[in-house]
Every structure is written in structure tokens, then in C-alpha cells.
Image (cartoon, coloured by chain):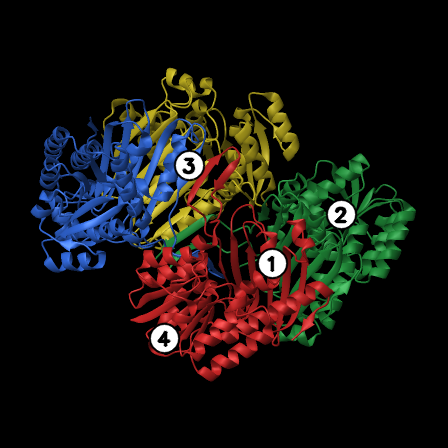
Chain colours: A red, B blue, C yellow, D green
């Protein structure tokens, strides 16, 4: 039984907290949150206790911590927990600055404790199936990866201002997915971005519509597109084209129902909410973390994966701003 | 908080027990099963206590019982629980004999306690969406209902011998679905059945492949087909054709993945296991029962629904055996 | 080069006439029609001459005739043409009475001339692919055949009155398809029919909504459903379920376009007009007839196929009227 | 009746020649080809005469010419025909050099004769439907256009060497489609390209796998990807994402058949051959040219469209070679 402490009981913290409580190999011992009510509610639901972050990090009876706090606390908490000998699962991103990530990872390396970054989409059963089939050679040599990712609606501008920008906040998931599927590091990054969805996002210096081209040293290509608004739901698709064939995962519709009449055949919108769309992914992600702790394997995606995705997001941000390609 | 006792901790009892334990408005108080280990395991998982059937039925602190025992105990337990003033949720069928069902329902009517029968498919989100849209008039006048239902594989012959036959054991779900979607009672039943999947089923006097035609007094038509074996998963489809259009719910594939190569585009099989396919349906079904108890509404599907489906199953059995249509 | 005469230059005659004219191995020599303008227009378009039916049947330079006249002339013309030594392609049905068909077929048999009946759907590329795969064993043993066939809209009541009724006029195609896919003769027929689409059809003594169950001697089952109205286009689907798997052919949508928005994902209606939906089938059907003439093979579907489908249509008509099953 | 001469009776010339011959408003008068047999065969099939290019261009009884010769003759023939007062339909591209195109277009402008360039995909019924719906505002403001275009297999290297490279030879269709759907000129071009399919293509200095990002002045984005090999057929998809929704056109499968078994649900590959996939597009394209000539409207796509696509192809070629973005 792995004893876990949860730092941060917000929307995503609640998901992880409940998943820990429901997992046969883990126990949720304590929950911390700056908002006492949030911590108390989740603790009550999961038979955990409320504690401060320091108390959790310092508790010798806690084996692992889940970091679900605001982004600007991630790196500090990873370091503190690693120094305290805890295994760490941290929500993405490690930090908005790649230098800070590097420092943080060296602290973790020195501590020798396991660190896993929450790129949950790798664990979505559909995307994981694509990856398994690609790894099994069903697509042959991977040549062209396509990732389409569109949110149902834009976040508040206040969120956008603190987010690090679309490439670091939203596309980072897709950059990780591209790396995951290419299985080779991109060396050339082209990006374009525009504010077409919400002018306030543009006024805040960010974009809400963007596309990226990646090229690896051996010539593999990935293309990613993002929009902060999709009227038909949370649009999440991947496609791998290779020498033997093409493998793709499509969207998840809310039902399998079709209504046919003179206007045509209408299917339901796709699932709208990321917590619903990726519910299984969050469960599988936690299971993978626990499995790594149980077997002593290195958790994946690693801190290095977090760093690489951040470097790509930085490069895409630069390319979109300058109109020039960036070489890594 | 509705306090519930569970009678029967087998495969389906475990589903209901866990759903009760997870529901915010219900509490699983006690679990009974002839196999002590089964009761103990489920009780431990759900923080319930183990008790005998009699103790549960006689416990004044228990508001409702869930009957998940073998079929031949259903009617007796419904009567006992109703007489004890309990609300009752009973797995289908009430009994394999329609006369016994009639007696049982009259006991329940006299007791004046709520009774709901577990035709879970009505609560599948896909099928429930079809029903809602049909009820909202999106198909116009319903004219032609099609239900396709094929199991991944045949049950053991020992099960078949005690099952009452395919029409009462398997197609009863589809007969209920046809009634649900037609919204009018069938008055004419035609059935054909064959043993094509497993000769042992034929030797046991049952069929494994069957189809039925139903016609209502106003002329609406339903067609149902069943097979005890589908190599591609648990095939569950419904379709309603009406004056304004057609509404259908298709199968649920295990993933959204497609693999394309020279052989074509391959999608995954459909979900194979009824507990996976109808996991949401079982949750929604329990929620509907609890909602009815909370509001004082009559639970639906009712005991009368159980009886009507059984009468149709009897008629289909007769028609398939005699090669003649049966009028009701 | 096979020299052909066309009897009947109506809607379906025009299709066949143009297909003959475009076929490299055939030549359309003459066209007959009671309406002189119809014959003249088609003859002009195809570089054929106008002639009377008698002249065509009596012309020693014509090798084969295509009979596309009203149904009540079919049997007489088949006999006349056969006696004149012509190969005959005749639109379905041979006649509305099975006795008349029997007489006609014996005349053809005596003449020893080839006769093919226009069950065009066997030649639809989608349905033909299903048949080829079934014949190749991809479905294993065929157990359950489903045919869904719904017209976009009902014909005029005047047509209905002379049509022989839905089972002989419309479902005969599906009965032939069921025979084609079952590859075994049905021995038990159950049918239900209602007038739900157009009350005038019911007043004329016919039905517009119907379903049929067929069972063969070895226990294979087919179910067919028909409606005279489908708001979403000309609904034509088949499905074969067998021991190894299921093979089906779906509808043909007018485009591959999908429009996604808050209401969902909308695809186009299915092709609405039978001449468009089965354009390729008519070409392939003619090609098969010409191929049979060239090789000396017996054309298929044969006159016997025409008779068998008619017997099933008669049985279905009787079953729907009496509410009883019919054994053959 | 518009009298037409055809220059070039190769694969694509034969398509156009037959389409002219079948069109009620056009007549194919004469066919020229350097290979006498090719011209003779097509002329025989279409009741046209064989003539030299000069004779056709100089024939006062010919209203319009279709140029289907090798690319390096296009510009010269357009100019000659325009000077002779002919309306001109020319296969893409006008020329591999944009300067040569500019000169050619100025000659045409001076002559004042109609010129249409054969970007046939605009006339594909699926893609044309997408365009109509986008133009009708169904997608709202267009923000993100995706074009996926993959050939079944690579051309011979000898062809590649003379082709102008993938961007000018293959992607030019997709660049035109992106302009067509964006309805605004791109001002920024990013491209990456690799030789992953056939090393001989790389040795010849070309790429076989490529992707492009386009950005317009107002910030609209298009992404295009190409591969010279798709094992599952000729992959041709477009998608328009906008403020109100998403509109896409998918691939055309060879049949609607699905085979389901333990391995899943298998659909057929997509149509493999561009002449089959775009057969309707070629007919509609010719019809649009004839309609423009009949009404006096300017044919579209115009010579200017040909130039703009070429400029984008040049920019993409440069970007892929230099690893830098190109601004227009």
C-alpha cells in the first residue's frame, strides 16, 4: 500500500484524490490546500486528513506526493518533496521557464527520487492504443504525425495572462504527444498563431488559434493545430502516418445516437469537458505511477519529458512571435 | 439516506452493491448470499455487514432491498419484502412463469410497496437518449422498431437448461425494449428460432438464433433478432423509424482507433462484456429507483412491465415451437 | 457485338437503353414504345431506330431483347421473344401471378433461350461485395440475414392499386436478396403489414409498412423490413451474420461532408433516387447478361429466381393478411 | 454548341476528351497528340478528327482548346491559342516558373480571351459542398484550414526529376485548395520536407513527405500535409474550422461494406486512383468552363489562381530547402 499526500485540492486535485482513494494499492493519507474548505471537503470524501503542505512533505509515513497546486509552486514543491525522499507526481508543467525546470530536475536527480509529470493524454485508452500499435510496428516507419486539439471554449483572460501563453499552456500537451508518437526529438520548429477567437486574448499578448510544424533530425514531421474554441465539443484527435499504414484515434461522442431526417444524419457533439474526456486517462496515469513505484521502474513521462515539451513550447512561442523558424 | 439490503452477492449483485455504496443518497447496510465468502467480500468492500436474507427482510431499519438471487427465488423474495414494507428492486425476470408473476404482483399491490424490475437497458445513456428523442417527437409517429441483440458467446448448456429458453432469458430484454420504444402493447407475435451456434443448445431443447415480429393494435411493427454468438463483441443496437425520421443507437467500440492499410480501415471490436457495456446503465437504473423512492413516484419499469415482457417471451417461445403466430 | 432491341422506353427502359449503347460489346438496334415520342427520343439519343414490338421480336438480326414494358405484358413478351429465339432480359417481376410465371418459364425452357430477370440489386457493387465475401466464407456459416429497404416516399395510389401490393411490388427485391444471401430456400414465412404512411394506401387494400421473417429448412433466418417512406433518403442496407462474423453494406450518402457545431455532427442524407443509387447496378447487370450470352452460361438471376421470389411475395402477402405463418 | 479542340491525348486528355464528347453543349472537333496512335484512338472513340496542334489552334471553326500536353508546352500553347482568339482550358500548372506565368497571363490579358486552369479538386462534389457551406457562413469566420493529401504511391524518379518538385507538382493542388477555402491570400509560408518514402526521390533532390503552414494577413491559418505513399488508397481530406463550427469532407471508400469479426470492423480502402476519385470533378470542371463561355463570365479558377498557387509552391520549396519561413 502506497501512502500518498495530495498538495492542492482544486479541480484536478480532486480527480487525483478520488482516484488514489479508489485504487487498491494506494491510500490517500492527507490533503493540503490553501482554501481550507477545499481540503476539508476532499478529505471527508476520501477518508483522508487535512494537513499543511509542510506537514505532508515532512511526514515520514507518506511515501509519495501528488502536486496539483498552481503552476508557480510546482518546481519548489517538487524540490522540497524530492529532498524529503518522496516520490513525486506533478501536474504539467514543471515550470513556465525551462531554466527553472533544469535546476529542479538536477535537484531531483541528486535526491534520486522518482518523478512523473502529468501528461495525462498518453494514458487515454484511445491514444495509448495508437501508441502501442505504432510501437508494435503496425504503421511501419513513422513519417507524419498529426495532432488536432481544440478546446470547447477559451479560458478567462485573467487565466490567459498568467498561463505562459497558448503554446506553453495548451499546446504543451500536444507537443508532448508529438514527441511521444514521433519517438525522436524535433530539431526544427515552425509556428504561427493568431487571435481570432477572443480579441481580449490578443490584447493580452497571446494567441488563441495556432499551428506548429516539427521536424526531427531524421526527417519525421509532426503538425499540430490548436484552437481555443470548438463549437462541437472538446476536439482531440491524433493520427500517425507511416510506411505500412495510418493509425488514428478519433473523438469520443457523447452517445452513439444518430438522428436521420431530411436534413441528414446527425450524431451527437463530442464530449465537452476534459475531465470527462480524460477520466480514464487520469485513472490510468495514476496506476502507471503506482506501478512504477511498486516495481522500481522510472516513472514515465519523466521530468526530462516535461523539460523537452517546455523547450518545444518556448520555441513555438518564439517562432510564432518572430515569424521565423527555430532550430534546436 | 435510503438504507438498503442486498440479497445475492454474485456478479450482478456486486455491481448493484458497489453502485449503492457509491451513491450519495443511499447506504448499503447489509449483504446476504448463500455463499458466505461472496457476502463477506462484498460487505468488506462496501462497509456493509453480512446478514441472512431473513434478517435483512425483517430489519425495520432497512428501507429497500435489491434482489439479485437466482431467478427461482425472485417472486418469493419480492413477496416477503413487500409484506415487510420494503421497497423492492428485483433483477429481471420476476419469474419464468407468467401466472406466478401475476400472483406476486397482486401481493405487491396489496402491500402497496414500490417495485422496480431491472430492465437495465432502458437506462443505457445511448438507448435512453433514443427514447427521449422519440418521446420528444423527433421521429414523428413510431412505425417500425428494430432491436438487434447478440451475445459474444453462448452460455454453458447447464445454464441454458434452467434459463427458460432464449426468448425468456435473453430476448426478454429486447421484448421490453420493443415495448418501451413502441409505447403500445403488441397483439400479434411471430417468432422463429434455430440452434445454429451450439448443437448442445438444440439438444437441450432451446434455440440460439432467433427473430421475432411484433405488431400492435394500431399497426406498429417491431422486429427483434438474437444470436448467442457474435465474434465481434456484444452487439446491441436499436433503431426507431417514424414519420419524421429515424433514430438509432449503435454499438460502443472499445476504442476510437482506426488502423488503415492495404486491407482497409479497421476499427476495434465492440465492447465484449455486458457489465462493461451497461456499466452506466446499472448506475442510472439504481439512481432512478432511488429517485422514485425519494419522490414517491412509481418506479419504472414496473412489475407490470416485467409481466408484459414475460407474456411476450412466452408467446415468442410458443410461436417458434409451433411455427404459428400467436395473438394476445 | 450483340444486337439488342428494347421493348419499353420509360424510365427504366431509358437506363437500359443508354447502358446498351455505351457498352462495347452491345449495340442498341431498335426501340419500341407505345408512346411514340418516348421511343423516338431514346432512339435519337442512342443512334437506334424506332420499331414496333412485333418488328423487334420478329427481326432475325436482333439477338436479344430487353423487356421494360408494364408488368402485365412481361410474360407474353418473354414467351414471344423466346419462341423467336431471342435471349431475353426482363425487368422484375415476370408476372404478378406465380402460375402465369410457371407457364411462361416452361415456354422459355422449351425454346431453350436464355432468360435473365432484372433483380438489379444483386449487382450493386456494395451488395455484390457482401455476396462475394459471404461466398468466400468470410462470415462462416450464414445464420441471420437482415435486409432493410425503405423508399424515400410512397408511390401514387393509382400505382399501388395495380402493383400487386407491397410484398410483390417492393419487397420482392428484398425477398430475392434474402434468397441470394441465405443461399437456401425459405420454407416458413411470417409477415406483418400496416398502412401507416398514407391512409389512401390502406384504403386501396395495401400496406406501406411491413416486415417479414423467413426460415429455411436448415434453420437459417432472414428478416426484412420495408417502409414506403424514409425522410432521410432511399434506405438500402443488408447484413449477414454468421459463425465467423458479420458482413454488412450500409447506405450511400450524397457526399462525405460533415458539419459539426453545437447541435452535433451532421452528415448528408443518403442518395434519394433509385436510379442514382443503383446506377452502377444497372450497368453491371447488363454486363452480366452480355457476359452470359457471350460465354453461353445461364444468365443469373434466372426465371426460376423470379418465380421463387414471387412465391415468397405471395406467401408474405397471405401471412400479412391472415395473421398466420405460411409454410412452403 | 461550343466546338473544341484537344491538345494532348494522354491520360488526362482522354478524360477531358470523353467528357467533352458526352456534354450536350460541347462538341469535340479535333484531337492532336505527338503520338499519332493516341490521337487516333481518342478521335475514333469520340467521333472527332485528328489534327496537328497548329491546325487546331488555327482553325477558325474551333471556339476553345483544352491543353493537356506536357507542362513545358502549356504557356506557349496558351499564348498561341489566346492570340488566335480561342478560349483556353489548361491543365495545371501554367508553368513551373512564376515569371513565365506572369508573361503568359499578360499575353492572355491582351488577347482578352477566357482562360481557366484545371484545379479540378475545386469541383469534386464533396469539396465543392464544403466550399458552398463555408461560403454560406455555416462555419462562421474561417480560422483554420486543414488539407491532407497523400498519393497511393510515388511516381517514377524520372517523372520526379522533371516535375518541379513535390511542392510544385503535387502540393500545388492543396495550396490552391487552401487559398480557395481561406478566401484570403497567405503572406507567410513555412514548409518542411523529407525524403522518407523512396530514397531515390531524395537523391534526385526532391522530397516525398512534406507539410506546410500558411498564414494570411488577417491571421487565418492553413496547414497542408503530403505524402507520396498511402497504403490505404488515395487519401484526400479537407477540413475548415471556424467560429460557428467545423466542416470537413472525408475520403471515398471503394464500397460501404464492413466486415466484423474478432479482429474488429474492417471497411474497404479508399478509392485508389485519382481518375476514379475525381471523375465527377473532371466532368463538373468542364461543365463550369462551358458555362462560363456560354454566359460570358470569367472562368474560375483563373490564370491568376494558377499564378498564386505557383508562388506559394515556390515559397514552400524555398522554405523547405532553407529551413526558414518565407514572407510574401
According to the image, label 2 marks what residue? Answer: D301
* Mark 3 neighbour class, 10 Å CA radius: few under 14, some 14 to 19, many 20 or more: many
Secondary structure of the residue carrying tag 2 is loop
Secondary structure of the residue carrying tag 3 is strand
For the residue pair B154 and C189, the one nearer the viewer reads as B154
Is there CB contact under 8 Å for labels 3 and 2?
Answer: no
Q: Do labels 1 and 4 share a chain?
A: yes
Distance, label 4 to label 2, CA atoms, is 62 Å
The residue drawn where x is 60% and y is 43% is: D244
x, y percent for residue B138: 44, 31
Secondary structure of the residue carrying tag 1 is strand
Marks 4 and 2: which is nearer the front?
4
Q: Which of marks 4 and 1 precedes in the sequence?
A: 1
Please state the chain letter of the residue tagged with numbered disc 3 in the rendered image. B
Q: Residue A293, labelled with which disc?
A: 4
Residue C185 visible, this angle: no
Is there CB contact under 8 Å for labels 1 and 4?
Answer: no
Q: Residue B247, labelled with which disc?
A: 3
According to the image, label 1 marks what residue? Answer: A225
Q: Which residue lies furthest to the bottom in this view?
A: A110
Question: Which quadrant of the figure has residue D103?
Answer: bottom right
Please state the chain letter of the residue tagged with numbered disc 2 in the rendered image. D
Q: In the rendered image of this protein, does residue A106 appear above or below residue D151?
A: below
Amino acid at each position: 500500500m502506497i501512502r500518498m499526500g495530495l498538495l492542492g485540492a482544486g479541480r484536478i486535485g480532486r480527480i487525483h484524490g478520488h482516484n488514489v482513494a479508489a485504487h487498491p494499492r494506494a491510500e490517500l493519507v492527507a490533503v493540503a490546500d490553501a482554501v481550507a474548505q477545499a481540503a476539508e471537503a476532499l478529505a471527508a470524501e476520501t477518508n483522508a486528513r487535512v494537513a499543511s503542505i509542510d506537514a505532508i512533505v515532512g511526514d515520514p509515513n507518506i511515501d509519495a506526493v501528488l502536486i496539483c497546486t498552481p503552476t508557480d509552486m510546482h518546481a519548489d514543491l517538487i524540490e522540497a518533496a524530492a529532498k524529503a525522499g518522496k516520490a513525486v507526481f506533478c501536474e504539467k508543467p514543471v515550470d513556465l521557464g525551462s531554466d527553472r525546470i533544469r535546476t529542479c530536475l538536477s535537484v531531483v536527480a541528486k535526491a534520486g527520487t522518482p518523478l512523473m509529470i502529468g501528461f495525462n493524454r498518453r494514458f487515454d485508452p484511445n491514444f495509448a492504443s495508437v501508441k502501442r500499435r505504432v510501437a508494435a510496428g503496425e504503421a511501419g516507419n513513422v513519417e507524419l504525425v498529426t495532432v488536432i486539439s481544440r478546446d470547447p471554449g477559451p479560458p478567462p483572460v485573467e487565466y490567459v495572462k498568467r498561463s505562459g501563453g497558448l503554446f506553453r499552456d495548451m499546446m504543451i500537451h500536444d507537443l508532448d504527444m508529438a514527441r511521444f508518437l514521433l519517438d525522436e526529438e524535433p530539431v526544427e520548429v515552425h509556428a504561427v498563431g493568431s487571435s481570432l477567437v477572443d480579441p481580449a486574448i490578443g490584447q493580452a499578448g497571446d494567441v488563441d488559434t495556432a499551428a506548429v510544424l516539427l521536424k526531427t533530425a531524421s526527417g519525421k514531421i509532426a503538425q499540430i493545430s490548436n484552437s481555443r474554441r470548438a463549437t462541437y465539443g472538446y476536439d482531440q484527435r491524433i493520427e500517425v502516418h507511416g510506411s505500412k499504414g495510418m493509425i488514428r484515434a478519433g473523438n469520443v461522442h457523447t452517445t452513439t445516437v444518430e438522428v436521420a431526417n431530411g436534413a441528414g444524419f446527425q450524431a451527437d457533439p463530442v464530449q465537452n469537458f476534459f475531465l470527462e474526456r480524460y477520466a480514464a486517462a487520469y485513472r490510468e496515469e495514476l496506476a502507471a505511477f503506482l506501478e512504477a513505484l511498486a516495481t522500481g521502474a522510472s516513472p514515465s513521462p519523466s521530468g526530462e519529458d516535461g523539460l523537452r515539451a517546455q523547450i518545444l513550447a518556448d520555441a513555438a512561442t518564439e517562432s510564432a512571435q518572430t515569424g521565423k523558424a527555430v532550430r534546436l
